[in-house]
């Protein structure tokens, strides 16, 4: 079978290789991958490396496919089932799990060999995280489940309340998903900032009450005007740059909450005014990973079509062309998310 292997920073270090197709042992399941996302983290890893991953790595946690073989002892999965998979499981016993901070589990079970491959095997420890998909849900939508689970973690940290004013910095796929969830939480002012008029128009159609093209307007001035000079209740950073992290703090009202969701390249720094944080009693949360219940919630939102993914899943790349074209397609101005087509 063909697999895409990352050997470190540099396009030449991301390449297709041939590996033996695994056969499931007792308790394991083999899935033929149909769709898998290539996200901003993967593009950054290819170009500049990644602090959290040591090569060689087969990436691919966000995927969906068809079960083609089931090991002895597996009872809730059958061949031919359309599925997606929760790619990690917290240990349940460590310092963080005991505090129900599952996203920081010290000893999680993770998918060791990812889904940027024609087939992926699921070990016994993760088999209970295999979920059947309705026939009406496309594979590419189901593959978005893990990303949406991470977004739900960010939503929980934001503590958005009815009638809040929320600013979302970022008009990509993640920003558009946040827009819909913020609307579902009951915010009455939703300001989405970005650089792409087409994406900002989509944000309006998905629930934004005001959009800001930051190349044409001042986000600071818009937020002040929309909030009577007070500032936003919540700001969600969904870009991943030092500049937008810094700006997010200046957009908040006293007592407001900032959620840092966007991942940044290694070495990124930003400057913040400690007095702004201190005297205005700002709350600042970083959002990374998710808890098991977030994955189930995300899949429910997708399967009930409570969230519209059509404007989010915009580009595809054939698996055979991934290592050559994936980064360039992902980095196109109009690409909100890129899915690998097998």
Image (tube, rainbow, N blue to C red):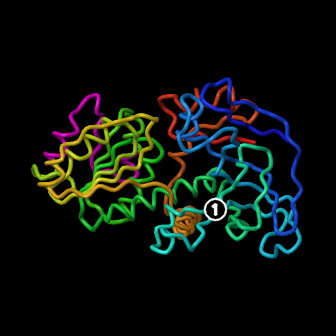
User: How far from the left and from the top, in percent, is residue 69?
Assistant: 87, 61
Task: Judge left or right: residue 225 versus residue 247.
Answer: left
Which part of the image, by quadrant, shows the C terminus? top right
The span picked out in magenta is: 203-225
Q: Residue at x 29, y 61 (%)?
A: 187
* Residue located farthest toward the front when viewing the structure as drawn: 95
Q: Indicate whether residue 110 is drawn in magenta.
A: no
Task: Judge left or right: residue 80 versus residue 224.
Answer: right
Q: Nearer the viewer, residue 76 or 282?
A: 282
Q: Is residue 184 above or below residue 267?
A: below
Q: Nearer the viewer, residue 101 or 201?
A: 101
Q: Residues within 10 Å of mark 1 (few under 14, many from 20)?
A: many
Which residue was labeled with disc 1? 86
Q: Is residue 140 above or below residue 123?
A: above
Q: Is residue 66 above or below residue 98?
A: above
Q: Indicate whether residue 208 is drawn in magenta.
A: yes
User: How far from the left and from the top, in percent, is residue 120?
Assistant: 77, 52
Q: Residue at x 68, y 60 (%)?
A: 84
Q: Nearer the viewer, residue 90 or 203?
A: 90
Q: Which of the 4 image quadrants contains residue 243?
A: top left
Which part of the image, by quadrant, shows the N terminus? top right
Task: Judge left or right: residue 326 versus residue 5.
Answer: left
Query: Is disc 1 placed on a helix, strand or loop?
Result: loop
Q: Residue at x 65, y 58 (%)?
A: 110
User: How far from the left and from the top, in percent, is residue 192?
Assistant: 32, 45
User: How far from the left and from the top, in percent, is residue 13?
Assistant: 68, 27
């Amino acid at each position: 079978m063909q697999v895409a292997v990352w050997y470190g920073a540099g396009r030449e270090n991301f390449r297709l290789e041939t590996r033996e197709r695994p056969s499931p042992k007792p308790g394991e399941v083999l899935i033929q991958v149909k769709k898998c996302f290539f996200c901003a983290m993967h593009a950054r890893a290819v170009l500049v490396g990644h602090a959290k991953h040591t090569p060689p790595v087969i990436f691919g946690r966000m995927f969906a496919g068809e079960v083609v073989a089931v090991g002895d002892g597996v009872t809730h999965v059958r061949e031919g089932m359309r599925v997606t998979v929760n790619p990690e499981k917290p240990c349940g016993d460590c310092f963080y799990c005991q505090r129900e901070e599952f996203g920081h589990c010290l000893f999680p079970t993770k998918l060791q060999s990812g889904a940027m491959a024609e087939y992926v095997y699921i070990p016994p420890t993760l088999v209970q995280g295999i979920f059947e998909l309705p026939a009406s849900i496309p594979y590419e939508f189901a593959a978005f489940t893990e990303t949406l689970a991470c977004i739900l973690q960010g939503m929980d940290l934001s503590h958005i309340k009815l009638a809040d004013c929320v600013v979302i910095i970022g008009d990509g796929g993640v920003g558009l998903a946040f827009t819909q969830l913020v609307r579902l939480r009951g915010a009455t002012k939703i300001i989405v900032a970005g650089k792409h008029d087409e994406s900002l128009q989509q944000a309006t159609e998905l629930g934004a009450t005001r959009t800001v093209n930051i190349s044409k307007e001042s986000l600071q001035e818009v937020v002040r005007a929309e909030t009577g000079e007070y500032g936003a209740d919540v700001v969600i950073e969904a870009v991943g740059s030092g500049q937008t992290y810094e700006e997010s703090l200046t957009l908040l009202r006293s007592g407001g909450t900032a959620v840092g969701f966007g991942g940044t390249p290694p070495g990124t720094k930003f400057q913040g005014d400690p007095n702004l944080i201190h005297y205005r009693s700002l709350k600042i949360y970083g959002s990374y990973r998710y808890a098991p219940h977030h994955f189930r919630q995300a899949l429910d939102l997708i399967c009930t079509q409570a969230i519209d993914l059509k404007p989010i899943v915009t580009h595809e790349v054939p698996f055979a062309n991934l290592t050559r074209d994936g980064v360039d397609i992902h980095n196109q101005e109009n690409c909100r998310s890129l899915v690998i087509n097998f």
